[in-house]
Image (tube, coloured by chain):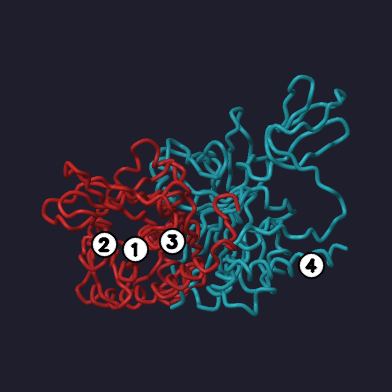
Chain colours: A cyan, B red
Amino acid sequence: MAVDMRLPAARRQVASLSAAQEKHLVVPGDIITTDVGFMRGHGTYMDEEKLTASVAGEVERVNKLICVRPLKTRFNGEVGDVVVGRITEVQLKRWKVETNSRLDSVLLLSSVNLPGGELRRRSVEDELAMRDYLQEGDLISAEVQSVFSDGALSLHTRSLKYGKLGQGVLVQVSPSLVKRQKTHFHNLPCGASIIMGNNGYIWLYPTPGQQDEEAGGYYTSLEPISLADREVISRLRNCILALTAHKVLLYDTSVLYCYESSRPHKIKNILKPEIMEEIVMETRQRLLEQAG
Amino acid sequence: MAAVQICEAEKVYIMHGVRDDLRVDGRGCEDYRHMEIETDVVSNTDGSARVKMGYTDILVGIKAEIGKPRPMVPDEGYLEFFVDCSANATPEFEGRGGEELGSEISSTLYKVFSNRNSLDMKALCIAPGEHCWVLYVDVLLLQCDGNLLDATSVAIKAALFSTRIPKVHISEDEEGTKELELSDDPYDCMRLEVEDVPCIVTLCKIGHRHVVDATLQEKACSMASLLISVTRKGTVTCIRKVGGGSLDPESIFEMTETGKRVGKALHAPLMKLLQEEEMLGKKKQKVGFLG
């Protein structure tokens, strides 16, 4: 039974390992440029002929378009993004899903696969049985189908890899830290699987056995998970939190390297500030070596 | 309390984990999260402390005022608690939303500190029956991530340790009216004996086992919890049961034993840390809120 108390330490600026390009960071109110030839994009506004930033982040310039990409923001969905969300309401013919965006996303009854995989028109019985499939509090993985005019996302789970999620752990991070990749579903070699939602919700779960592959999320197994799998999942969770604390971009390789660096430490010690720093330094080093 | 919604499958995962003594973040059932404690964060109070445990952030400020002692105990001072659940923590606390939680916590604190042996109230007396020190303890919940009472009690103990009450001289002039003079010297002050101040341990029953320092997700899986306030010698000063579920007398006994053990182990590192911080004196790196 360990109690770890200490005095707080001021956050130290970690020396940037790659001094390749100087990032142009701004805070709200900073003048980006006084040149009038640029078009203003997201995160900027015109203040007396001067282009000023309205959010805190990094300035991005594409030819004549200047925009500011904020470091910490709500999830702004695009078509095709994979998200992990939690059902908040069951309404008439649709579910409201919380996905860390400005408005709750919508999952229409017509956008889910019915049990049995039949392709038929949704009837009144289906509407009444909605709560049997997805209740308030359930977690789902889905893909963004379209964006409504007010900015709300419309999701769909029309593929066997999406659907209701079973036993596992949810980690919530900032959406800007999740890297956009070809696939967001990974079976990590350390023995667990991960779904990296673009909205910052990361789902860790034990790798399903062969027979469960094509279940599509209708049957949630409530069997106890083995201790070894639990340890892997807890360690991954702490590693992800360590990477988030040091603002490292999250993708399968960075999480895996962090996991390997954290092997010599006990799982519960990973969240101690000095051990977090050590592990993240090692991970950054390896990522640089791999890139360069 | 700021609660999170979790689904059946997550609850089952957490319960099986607790049964195997491996919680979601790798801790055992009796491990606390990493705590950061700093005193003297608010400059215009007589004593203050800030405790961060996980994402839970508690700020305690203590102000000493001169008041009239209670009629039942004319030679003792007293403590007044006020808990403010800031809307910073969760939108549920906006307006009067946090009042219920705040009054629950403050009534628990009153109960814990009503014990005669926790704090020497006689030291707070100035003139029996006429003047005494009243310590107004204000607790501010900045962020809620479970285990509010444990963090609050640690913060109160740290704030009481750092409280400096100015010394009072009573002078009588010719007509017999007493005048109170507060010493101007900022170093001429009285410190409080906090050795016997208890710390609260919250034990949540999940399945057949109980856990210390539950996060919000673990709290959502538990039906009943036991609050035990324990002194440094392991004496239990107050027990309270919260939650809608029922507790078996057997489990109450087991939980009390665990609470005594865990609570006793909290005091030594805390006092050591507070004394270490005091030793640093001027060299202490003030972190505060912008560190």
Q: Is residue B7 left or right of residue B199?
A: right
| Residue depicted at x 39% and y 76% | B265
Residue occupied by mark 4: A285
| Residue depicted at x 57% and y 69% | A233
Disc nearest the viewer among 1 and 3? 1
Task: Determine whether the residue tagged by mark 2 lies in a helix, strand or loop.
Answer: helix
Which numbered circle lies on residue B192? Answer: 1
Q: Given the image, what chain letter belongs to the residue carrying mark 1?
A: B
**Hey, what amino acid is under mark 2?**
Ala
Q: Is residue A246 left or right of residue A292?
A: left
Mark 1 → mark 3, Cα distance in angstroms: 33 Å
Residue B151 in the image: state x and y as whole percent.
40, 61
Mark 1 → mark 2, Cα distance in angstroms: 8 Å
Disc nearest the viewer among 2 and 3? 2
Residue A80 in the image: state x and y as whole percent.
68, 44
Along the viewing direction, whichever of B196 and A240 lies nearer the viewer: B196
Which numbered circle lies on residue B215? Answer: 3
Task: Determine whether the residue tagged by mark 1 lies in a helix, strand or loop.
Answer: loop
| Residue depicted at x 62% and y 50% | A174
**Hey, what amino acid is under mark 4?**
Gln
Task: Determine whether the residue tagged by mark 3 lies in a helix, strand or loop.
Answer: loop
Mark earlier in primary sequence (1, 2): 2
Along the viewing direction, whichever of B53 and A141 lies nearer the viewer: B53
Mark 2 → mark 3, Cα distance in angstroms: 38 Å
In this view of the protein, can residue A138 be seen by the observer? yes
Residue occupied by mark 2: B123
Task: Determine whether the residue tagged by mark 4 lies in a helix, strand or loop.
Answer: helix
